[in-house]
Amino acid sequence: MRLRNITGSREVIAASAYVVHEERRWRGKWAQLFENTLPIHIEIGMGKGKFIHTMARLHPEINYIGIEKYSSVLLRAIQKMEEEELPNLRFIRMEAEEITEVFAPGEVDRIYLNFSDPWPKDRHARRRLPSRQFLARYDVILEARGQLEFKTDNRELFDFAVEELAPAGWKLREITRDLHQDAVLMQDNVMTEYEEKFSAMGNPIYKYVIYREK
């Protein structure tokens, strides 16, 4: 998807107190940035930030970090924070490939992937956020008992994601191919902008929760 560039977005991001700048210097020290030792949950590819902002409001006992590479959509997340500031939420503008350079081993307690770019061409498979290449990165930063949650409306991407688990050494904890008809997994479900749009169109939402045995 080609995102329209918003003039001045980079300048707003650079000046925002809600965005963590020089993020690599906080590797292994995120507790110092939040000034507490609460668990850290991250969303990679957070888009406009509805999901992670809602989660941070509902769970003040958890620190949240939203990661987004596109300035135009990160700007929308900043605007949400300007309307409703939350002390347990910060943003990073970065490429997901750099994740192990920003978080130390075991520093993250949970990872969320929501409606990630499907990168439909086979030659781009390693760029997909639920690919085995990315699962190896998540394995480094995720706490031993931590888990990863993935949601999408793209059946092909979801099938690919499930097939990647065994080669990467991950296991399923929960899985559904129609989230909104799953009474258990719908408990406490927080919808993203895309989820609201696609579910309203009648599209099934796919979700899994995965972990590693360590």
Image (spheres, rainbow, N blue to C red):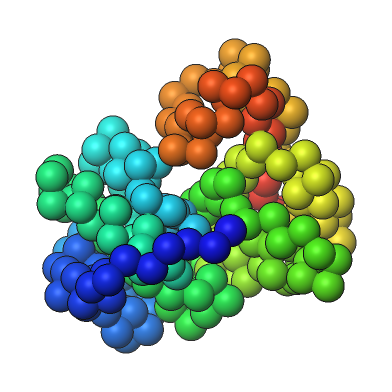
Quarter of the image with the N terminus is: bottom right
Q: Position of residue 15 (x, y in %)?
A: 15, 75
Residue at horizontal 43%, vertical 75%? 94
Q: Position of residue 36 (x, y in %)?
A: 21, 59
Q: Is residue 56 above or below residue 164?
A: above
Q: Name the quadrant containing residue 27.
A: bottom left
Residue at horizontal 85%, vertical 66%? 122
Residue at horizontal 77%, vertical 39%? 155
Q: Position of residue 29 (x, y in %)?
A: 31, 75
Residue 83 visible, this orientation: yes
User: Of residues 106 and 161, which is closer to you in this image?
Assistant: 161
Quarter of the image with the C terminus is: bottom right
User: Of residues 47 and 108, which is closer to you in this image?
Assistant: 47
Residue 147 visible, this orientation: no
Q: Is residue 155 above or below residue 47?
A: above
Q: Is residue 100 left or right of residue 131?
A: left
